[in-house]
Amino acid sequence: MKKFLFILSTLSLFLLTSCRISLFFSSNEGINNKEKVEIENGSLYEFKDNLKNNGPLTTNAFPSIGSPKLLVIPISFDATKESSSYINDIKVAFSGTSEETGYYSVKEFYKESSYGKLNIEPVVLDEFYKPKFSKSYYEGYNTRLDTGSSILLKEALSYYDEKIDYSDYDYDNDGCIDAVWLIYNCSVSFSGDNDFWWAYQTSNLTDELYDNKRAYYYAFAGIDFMYDKKHVAYDPTNIKIDAHTYIHETGHLMGLDDYYDYDESRGLSDRGTYEADMMDSTFGDHGPISKLLLGWITPTVINADYKSSISSFAKTGEVFLITKDFYGTIYDSYYLLVLYDEYGINALDKPFAKDIFGQSGILIYEINAEKNLDSKGNANYNGGSYNTGFKYDNSDTQKKFVRMIPPLNSYILKSPLYKNGSFNEIDYFKVNVACDNLNQYSFTIEFI
């Protein structure tokens, strides 16, 4: 999904392209001085840094670990769509079972994707908030600090202030409501003729206090995404209530970027992750870099010749981090190696991604996750349409934040998956892959 929206910040006017738009203030996290960390080859390493703790431009993001509550406010611009059935469908999309959704709800997706480390507790209000003004007022609203959606956010939070204890929604006690979802009931602009009525995440640090809490991260999307069978990149046949879009945007609420090109003519034809990632084409599981950034997995570090069997990433979270020089930080360049198979989330989405889902094999990702900070430790922007605190991204920069590295014979296999006998020479190491049977893989890394 991509849309164009103008947002006016305290500093400048950004043209942002995405299902995600982010309005942030400058970071004061300090300069990222790296020091080499000595670690035994093949040892597990638990990173102390992640997006929530010290990610670039992710201050006050939604918690990625624990049981935070997620406030969901239905917004009504269409009186014909105010029935309890729509409210119930929103509740199913955020908290329902796989039987109710035909896929996953937001809650169930993140419970499985995080290996049980994130148990979101969505709270969907039982009524539609009715805005003070007409649709046109909000879609055309831009001031120095606010947009139409931020005005809606503040209106709704003020309206429910006497009915809701917002301190219940600050799981990490950082002084901000963890996140708010606004779900509107008027038509989504699938045709692209009105960028406001789409799905996106953004943030606006309010001056107003709600039970001594400020609002910051929020997401905005229409109910039409639950029912759309026409504008999706996956097979919706068996889906009853579709939560794919809400799942993707909730990833943004935790600080994750998009992993697809906004202008594919400038980027790689494989889009970096071959569409096989929730932050790429809005289907499939989260990939290893996202789970590393969210604090869900502990990698095994390889910095010399190494041989090992490997378990399903979807089942166990096992991941190997390959680097010539290890600095003990997520915010660096390295390679991640995992075993992909059609399990869980991948099994449901397996027919849809190009040349990956429905198969098994080893995936190798090139990661360029350096922060984009100036000499004072403040966040720089990449200068494109995408607003991120990373030096590289998959949306604007030619060098990718995350990119699958296919085997040498991928032009025959037409897949980035390493199968039996697959080989490649990548930067400072060689990789060989062996498959004993259907899903029993091993690999050998030789440093060169």
Image (tube, helix red, strand yellow):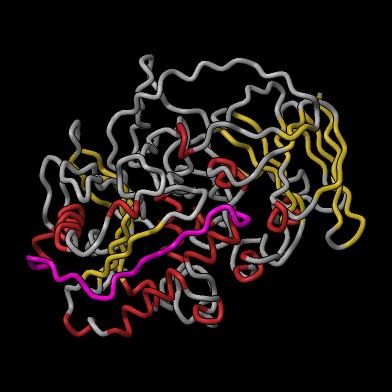
Q: Nearer the viewer, residue 212 or 382?
A: 212
Residue 276 visible here: no
Q: Nearer the viewer, residue 311 or 112?
A: 112
The x, y position of residue 372, in whole percent, is 43, 27
Q: Residue at x 60, y 61 (%)?
A: 112
Q: In terms of image quadrants, where is residue 39?
A: top right
Quarter of the image with the C terminus in it: top right
Q: Residue at x 46, y 70 (%)?
A: 95
The x, y position of residue 362, in whole percent, is 76, 50
Q: Residue furthest right?
A: 436
Q: In terms of image quadrants, where is residue 255?
A: top left
Is residue 197 in the magenta section? no
Note whether 317 is above or below 12 in the view shown: below
Residue 85 located left or right of residue 250: left
Is residue 133 in the magenta section? yes
Residue 262 located left or right of residue 353: left
Q: Nearer the viewer, residue 283 or 211?
A: 211
Note whether 304 is above or below 184 in the view shown: above
Q: Nearer the viewer, residue 95 or 368?
A: 95
Query: Where are the magenta residues, as a range?
Result: 114-134
Q: Residue at x 10, y 44 (%)?
A: 143
Residue 130 located left or right of residue 448: left
The x, y position of residue 102, in whole percent, is 54, 79
Quarter of the image with the N terminus in it: bottom left
Q: In terms of image quadrants, where is residue 235?
A: bottom right
Residue 430 visible here: yes
Q: Main secondary structure of the magenta part?
A: loop
Note whether 54 is above or below 200 in the view shown: above
Q: Residue at x 72, y 23 (%)?
A: 324
